[in-house]
Amino acid sequence: MEKFSSEDRSILIRLASRLPSGSPERRAILSGLKKSAPDYLPKSGLEPFKKILDLIEESPDSYMKRSMLEIAKEMESSAKNFFNRGERFKPQAELILGDAGNMVSIVSMLKHPKERELKKLLDGVVRDFSPIVKSLRRSG
């Protein structure tokens, strides 16, 4: 199915909101929008962000925990906004990518006990969000 531009999607959403709830026309518009939803969302969802927070919480080093927990919570919050609010929150991808890069540096410097597992999760975040950020930079 053909993808709609964000402007077309907005127009169709406004139109659907003005139609009676449950009407065949409204259902058809919403169904078409759902089928043509953007494919920029990483398939992994929020799971890696939850695992990253869990691994940091397990850290015996309180300095490391404090240093990384703040960044991890910020990254998870950006990810929630990104996944829950979609198109208009695509710029959050750049924040997520930056936070993941910062955490990779911290993990390497401080030698986290589960460094390999944490790096693997962070590398996955970087891999998922890099194309999104590249497309934003090209379009912006």
Image (tube, helix red, strand yellow):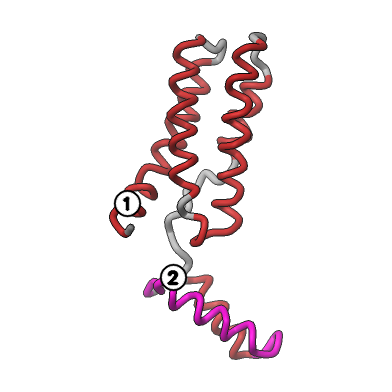
Determine whether 19 is above or below 60 in the image. Answer: below
How far across and how far down the image is residue 134, in percent? 32, 48
Task: Check disc 1 and report the residue beneath it.
Answer: 137
Amino acid type at mark 2: Ser
Earlier in the chain: of badge 2 and badge 1, it is 2
Q: Which residues are magenta?
A: 2-23
- Of residues 43 and 111, which is closer to you in this image? 111
Tell me which residue sits at (43%, 29%) in the image: 101
Tell me which residue sits at (64%, 14%) in the image: 59
How far across and how far down the image is residue 46, in percent? 59, 43
- Queried whether the magenta region covers residue 14, the answer comes back as yes
Q: Residue 50, located in which quarter of the rendered image?
A: top right
Lateral position of residue 93 relative to residue 74, left or right: left
How far across and how far down the image is residue 117, in percent? 51, 21
Q: Single out the residue that lies furthest toward the front.
A: 140
Q: Residue 4, located in which quarter of the rendered image?
A: bottom left
Label 1: element kind:
helix
Tell me which residue sits at (44%, 75%) in the image: 7
Determine whether 26 is above or below 138 in the image. Answer: below
Binning the other alpha carbons within 10 Å of mark 2 as few (below 14), some (14 to 19) or many (20 upward) gives: few
How far across and how far down the image is residue 51, in percent? 61, 30
Q: CA distance from mark 2 to mark 1?
A: 16 Å
Task: Check disc 2 and report the residue beneath it.
Answer: 6
